[in-house]
Amino acid sequence: MGFAWGCAAVECTLEWKRSRPMVAETPETRTTSVTAPAIDRNATILWMLLAVFGVGTVEYLVAGVLQDISGDVDVSVATGGLLITVYAVTVMIGGPLLTIATVRVPRTPLIAAAMTVFIAGNIGTALAPNFATLVVFRIITALPHATFFALCLVLATSLGEPEFQGRAIARVSLGLNLATVLGVPLGTLIGTELGWRWEFALVALFQTAVTIGLITVTRRVPSHSGGSITSELSVFTKAPVLWALGLTALSQAALFVVFTYITPLLHDHAGFSTGTVTVLLFVFGLGSVAGNQLGGYFADKSIDRTLYFALGARGGTRPAGAAG
């Protein structure tokens, strides 16, 4: 999954950049890899990775404590799973609209505003007294998700040479993989020991610190001028962009189908203990990390061949998985 997702993310971001209407450059808006010192590039990618890690952890966090949340707000596990569905639908519908609406907003205020909404949503989630309130705050938390992630991916491609853009995207996307390796298992452990509400409160605290660091480093990175809303929308008439978006959407849909109910499936139906489930989530995340980094590396060599291999390999594992 991580390999295909890494390739799809690279393809989607690069096709979007290639297909955007060109904006005339001026000495003030021109950016190249030499305008940002290497130390600033590394620091910027690190802070973006950490920020994406926090966002990704919250995206998947409910899966690890779904039974605890459902019991606390007195709903079934199936109904509790809607918290993940609502988050995903908000990202899918609200994300592109918010991204287009904020295309002319300068980077630093946009990061600050997006993360303020995200942090407020997590605080509200931690304090929510019932399921309906939880749904509302999950929607609020999800609103800046796509906009922030897109901003980070595009910024990553502008920080290095073209032949290393795939690896730059993979390094930022590593935050999502680390969310499954570290964030969700650690959150599950915290939820078991302290209660699920502490998970969201701690994420809000973590994201506050990361946002301060991210704003500090990105303020020194030159900005590109954005186009008009009409010009931004025109990229969706390009076949490669639509193909890349479709592949990314299908990859994420497959991940959510598995990950939403992975804890009750492993615990209730497969008979694994809570401790073993945490280990299995960690192993799942390790596979995502390795696949994502390999996807970014090979995408720089040949993105088409890499995608064909990744999707072919995934298809080849289905019969074995079904047989098991």
Image (cartoon, grey):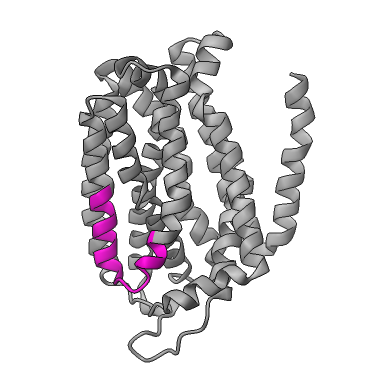
Q: Predominant secondary structure in magenta?
A: helix
Where on the picture, by quarter, is residue 128?
top left
Q: In the figure, is residue 249 to the left or right of 134? A: right
Residue 298 position within the rendered picture, expressed as x and y whole percent measured from the top left: 65, 57
Q: Is residue 181 magenta?
A: no
Residue drawn at (61%, 40%), measured in percent from left and top?
A: 1
Height in image: 121 above or below 173?
above
Pick the front one: 50 or 269: 269
Where on the picture, by quarter, is residue 159?
bottom left
Height in image: 162 above or below 300?
below
Residue drawn at (49%, 26%), measured in percent from left and top?
A: 281
Residue 68 position within the rendered picture, expressed as x and y whole percent measured from the top left: 35, 17
Q: Is residue 184 visible?
A: no
Quarter holding the C terminus is top right
Where on the picture, by quarter, is residue 323?
top right
Q: Is residue 103 magenta?
A: yes
Residue 73 position within the rendered picture, expressed as x and y whole percent measured from the top left: 30, 19
Pick the front one: 324 or 227: 227
Magenta highlight range: 98-117
Residue 230 position within the rendered picture, expressed as x and y whole percent measured from the top left: 47, 76
Residue drawn at (63%, 71%), measured in percent from left and top?
A: 238
Height in image: 17 above or below 311?
below
Q: In the figure, is residue 138 to the left or right of 276? A: left
